[in-house]
């Protein structure tokens, strides 16, 4: 189970949300690093963990949210509004 916390410190890996796609769909970070999602669409999106352990909540156009991952593992996620939108965060030690 991930313990995702609001980010602080080192610069995050960015996932752009554009045309209803997470780009890149998979990112790999080390434990303690962060991922930042930025929505470029007019439609609102979220990045929501499959297990709902973490969630960016609604991102409007231009909105962004950053989540820190402290526990190694693979975290598939989706958009709560468009569940066909999928991605994953891989956290290594
Ligand atoms: Cu969406």
Image (cartoon, rainbow, N blue to C red):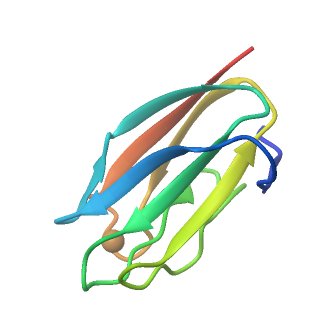
- Quadrant of image for the N terminus: top right
In the displayed structure, 45 sits above or below 77; it is below
Q: Nearer the viewer, residue 12 or 75?
A: 12
Residue visible at 46% across and 32% down?
27
As drawn, the residue found furthest toward the left would be: 19
- When asked about the image quadrant of residue 57, the answer is bottom right
In the displayed structure, 89 sits above or below 12; it is above
Q: Residue 78, position in %: x, y? A: 43, 56
Q: Nearer the viewer, residue 48 or 41?
A: 41
Q: Nearer the viewer, residue 49 or 90?
A: 90
Q: Residue 35, position in %: x, y? A: 58, 46
- Quadrant of image for the C terminus: top right
Ligand 1 resides in the quarter of the picture at bottom left
Residue visible at 79% across and 33% down?
32
Q: Is residue 55 left or right of residue 84?
A: right
Residue visible at 34% across and 64% down?
83
Residue visible at 80% across and 30% down?
71
Q: Is residue 20 left or right of residue 52?
A: left
Q: Is residue 2 left or right of residue 63?
A: right
In the displayed structure, 60 sits above or below 10; it is below
- When asked about the image quadrant of residue 73, the answer is top right
Q: How many circles with numbers are drawn on the protein?
A: 0
Q: Nearer the viewer, residue 9 or 72?
A: 9
Q: Residue 68, position in %: x, y? A: 73, 47
Q: Residue 19, position in %: x, y? A: 16, 65
């Amino acid at each position: 189970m991930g313990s995702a916390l609001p980010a602080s410190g080192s610069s995050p890996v960015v996932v752009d949300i554009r045309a209803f796609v997470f780009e890149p769909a998979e990112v790999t970070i080390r434990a303690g690093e962060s991922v930042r999602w930025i929505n470029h669409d007019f439609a609102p999106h979220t990045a929501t963990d499959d297990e709902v352990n973490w969630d960016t909540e609604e991102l409007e156009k231009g909105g962004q949210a950053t989540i820190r991952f402290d526990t190694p593992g693979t975290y598939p996620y989706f958009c709560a509004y468009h569940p066909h939108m999928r991605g994953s965060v891989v956290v290594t030690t």
